[in-house]
Amino acid sequence: MLILLTIQVFYAESMKKLHNYINGELIPPVSGDYFDNYDPSRGIPYSLIPDSDKRDIDLAVEAAKNAFPEWSNLSKEARSEFMLKISNRIQERMDEFVKAESLDNGKPEKLAAHVDIPRAVSNFKFFATAILHFASESHYMEGLGVNYTLRKPIGVVGCISPWNLPLYLFSWKIAPALAAGNTVVAKPSEITPMTAYLLSEVCKEVGLPNGVLNIVHGMGAKVGDAISHDVNIKAISFTGGTQTGKIIASIAAPMFKKLSLELGGKNPNIIFDDCDFDKMLSTTMRSSFANQGQICLCGSRIFIQEGIFEKFKKAFVEKVSKSIVSNPTDPNAQLGAVVSKPHMEKILSYVELAKEEGGTVLTGGERVILDGEYKEGYYIRPTVIEGLEYNCRTNQEEIFGPVVTITPFKDEEEVMMMANSTQYGLSATVWTNNLNRAHRVADQLNCGIVWINSWLVRDLRTPFGGTKASGVGREGGFEALRFFTEAKNVFISNE
Ligand code: NDP
């Protein structure tokens, strides 16, 4: 027993300790406590996360308040320069960021190298330059005068992000907030803190002024909650689950904080029988299982028109069953580990629910045990289920893993009814070569983003977000800069 305890203490002491980044310094949490950060590919802890609380948020807010006057009064060009330096430095440290993201999250390194980190680099670059083109509006009134609209930074803002695309979504919030002249208190997910920690190192390296960006690690119920409650934080940009979004809104709305909430999804992938079958099939593999199905934009409900249902089912199941589930460093891995043990258990419980609801698992549906050091990792075989009603729980609730259902449909009317039937409204994918139908269906889908004959094509200038329980507000392009500024209209009379 004593030996075991000694080994555990030694192990804990030898693990890398992350620090909070407050007022330009990398510092321990006020509590002095840490908790384990897990490597999901091996199922073991590998670093220690600061167990921060309200006291750390107080320090961060104080630093951000002090930094605000100078940062908001810097020229746009000067702020832009800092952000370009951050972007370039992440680019220079690309390999390190890629490995860190993959280790922390379980995603294949290949994916982090092609999507996560390059997109984080682009986010900083994009908003560094977008702010230079962010013009204020003016409205002339004949004979009376002219209105012009000033857009001022808000002050100290909070950014809270999830674990699925850790640095990508963290930077998607921080970059527009900083570009617009705000100072920031940010919290990454406790489950994937590592690249946010590396970002704080980068901010120090490029000499970002103290207090402009503060990153506080720790649990949502303590650190996130303190951000929601703090009266000095005037706006919160949150991405995460719908339930957490409700909690944040219930605390922040009565304080009249500005809120941007990017929440869950249960996206339809609608396949008409006149589509380009091969292109649809390979893209549907990605839209179903990229990042182990843990992208809010993945299409987890696949609707296929009757005429090609059997053909699709055969080809899709064959392809899915051959997918390579492997450790994230394997260059052949198509799927890596899911993010945590509780999340793996949640996903597998939904497979059981699907069976109870009368579904048939066509392929997958179970945990994958890899060899050697990866045998305790959290791997799930990609799963395809058929035979479920469109309105059963499996087809209505967000699973957020490598599990999709396939459902046949007769015509547009029927599929529109099923596609729009959930509480969510984030995104949809439509496959058809009929131009009129493509426009018609895009118009009728109740969601914020529609891809026709494609998936996950992102132009950073376009509005990003969902309807219904998928959120409130839009991110992306000038929408994000509008969110992170207050508009003030000024009228000047002609007379
Ligand atoms: P959570 O809602 O559990 O967590 C998101 C963030 O909120 C984390 O940083 C979390 O901290 C923090 N948090 C948790 N509880 C609180 C609280 N009471 N107050 C303030 N902050 C809190 O989501 P997940 O991290 O599990 O991410 C998955 C979800 O995110 C899915 O529903 C997915 O659809 C959604 N998502 C939506 C996107 C969109 O653009 N619409 C994009 C990507 C994901 P901690 O991790 O420490 O608990």
Image (tube, rainbow, N blue to C red):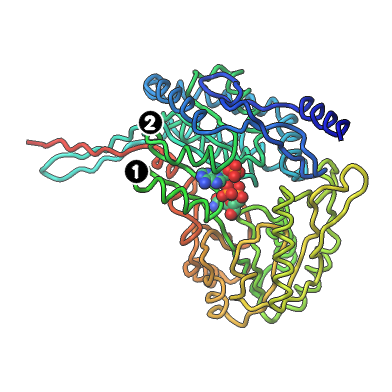
x, y percent for residue 83: 53, 26
Q: In the rendered image, is residue 460 in sight?
A: no
Q: Position of residue 186 (x, y in %)?
A: 52, 34
Compared to 81, does 192 lie above or below?
below
Does 449 sit left or right of 198 as displayed?
Answer: left
Which quadrant of the structure image shows residue 137? top left
**What residue do we see at 37% from left, 42% from top?**
257
**Which amino acid does the dot numbered 2 rest on?**
Gly
The answer to whether the residue labelled 1 contacts the one labelled 2, judged by CB atoms less than 8 Å apart, is no
Q: Quadrant of the N terminus?
A: top right
Q: Which residue is farthest left? A: 495
Residue holding disc 2: 155
Q: Residues within 10 Å of mark 2 (few under 14, many from 20)?
A: many
Looking at the picture, does residue 117 appear above or below residue 459?
above
Q: Is residue 450 visible?
A: yes
At a point 55% along the width and 16% down the height, the residue shown is: 207
Image quadrant where one finds the C terminus: top left
Residue name at image x 68 percent, y 43 percent = 115
Task: Say which residue label 1 marks.
Answer: 255
Foreground disc of the pair 1, 2: 1
Q: Tell me the amino acid under the disc marked 1.
A: Met
Quadrant of the rendered structure where residue 418 is? bottom right
Q: Horizontal placement of 65 versus 216: left or right?
A: left
Residue drawn at point x = 74 percent, y = 50 percent: 341
